[in-house]
Image (cartoon, grey):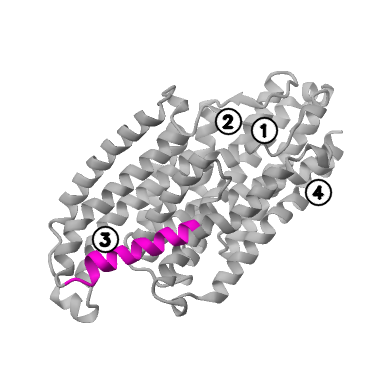
Amino acid sequence: MEVIEAYGTILIILAMVFGLYMTWGVGANDLANAMGTSVGAGAVTVKQAIGIAIVFEFAGAVLAGGNVTKTIRKGIIDPTSIADNPEILVYGMLAALLAAGVWLMIASTRGWPVSTTHSIIGALVGFAIVGIGPDAVNWGKIGKIIASWVISPAVGGIISFLLVMSTRKLIFDTENPLKNAKKYAPVYIFLVGFIISLVTLFKGLKHLNIDLSGGMSFVLAFGIGLLTALVGWLLVRGVAEDPEADREFHFASVEKVFTPMMLFTACSMAFAHGSNDVANGIGPLAAVVSIVSSGGEVMQKSNMPIWILMLGGAGIVTGLVTMGYRVMLTVGTKITELTPSRGFCAELAAASTVVLASRTGLPVSTTHILVGSVLGVGLARGIGALDLRVVLNIIISWLVTLPVGAVLAMGFFFFLKGIFG
């Protein structure tokens, strides 16, 4: 308690700096891989992707980031045994932010799309083991997370594979692909609007004090889906056949129909990412602010001040602008060759899997889902369409994320404890 009274302001400033650093990593890695498919498919340029992200990521983080967050992310650790020593939890949260931030920076410089969710979870586990005791860790939850490494990419991959096959059957393998592309485009765009709306309505909007039932969310999402389908139809109906481009690539005109469709998925993925993943960076920051401002009270939930949401949004956007291009290149161009139709299928599959996971309560990673979806798109063209060396590097980076986060957090925890203790 004495530590919090004496150093409260310093601890909050450190939490803000480390939280900004962590959300910078979220932008450089997680958001970059959400935008990578759009860039890799040639639907948007890197500059346009950054512009879309600045608007929609920030909007998602601030509008739908939630006003209450579980400060102990996803019930991974139980801090009740250190209620009399709240400074231990403060050191732990600071160590977790710093550890996750460092690992995300290392991964981003290498172009590895790793999970920010699992980075912060690994860091929290590392702190809990040395700061509270191994019994404070919810090992059952950790087991579920490890299972999700296989389940979530597999589900994303299967859905994207089926979507690619559907575009082949309905559009590419028909007598008039361009006509059919325009005919079915509004249906696919409806799915984007409907699914992304469901993600947001299910997982966000508490911040706006809007609490909708499952049925109401479904109806509202259906309406938004119809609206996006109408806008999409207006955008694609004017796409004309380009005989010159079709000579070089038989389906060039058809792919032009999917280019405006990918703008919908790019905007939607940025908004959904901002509303869902901003808590990875600012949950521990909110915990520190809550403990210090309450004079040392340890709570499982705390209010989320708007300035913390804005800080998180700013950090994420800065990360994408400064370092995001490396991960964008890996996801967008190095796993498999993407065209607008393939990129669209990958992003729609990823969004669908996120909805499925959020309803079933599986602790999944958007990174794993999106990479799995890109793999599914590649497999639809045969195993030779994948760069297996890049895939292997990505899988290794996934496997080491939890333990690396844990070890880094242990080191930073003892360092901070030594300084303030």
- How many numbered marks, from 0 up? 4
Residue 13 - label: 1
The magenta-colored residue range is 155-174
- What x and y, as percent, mark residue 288? 68, 30
Label 4 vs label 3: CA separation? 48 Å
Q: Earlier in the sequence, mark 3 or mark 1?
A: 1
Is 263 situated left or right of 280 in this image? left
Q: Earlier in the sequence, mark 4 or mark 3?
A: 3
Check disc 3 and report its element: helix, strand or loop: helix
Pair 4/3: label in front: 3
Residue 258 - label: 3
Give the residue number, with chain letter if any, for mark 2.
Answer: 69
Give the residue number, with chain letter if any, for mark 4.
Answer: 411
Q: Are marks 2 and 4 in contact (CB under 8 Å)?
A: no
Q: Earlier in the sequence, mark 4 or mark 1?
A: 1
Q: Is residue 111 above or below residue 267?
A: below
Q: Is residue 104 above or below residue 413?
A: below
Is 107 situated left or right of 215 in this image? right
Check disc 2 and report its element: helix, strand or loop: strand
Residue at point 37%, 32% (across, down): 217
Q: Earlier in the sequence, mark 1 or mark 2?
A: 1
> Is-magenta flag for residue 184?
no
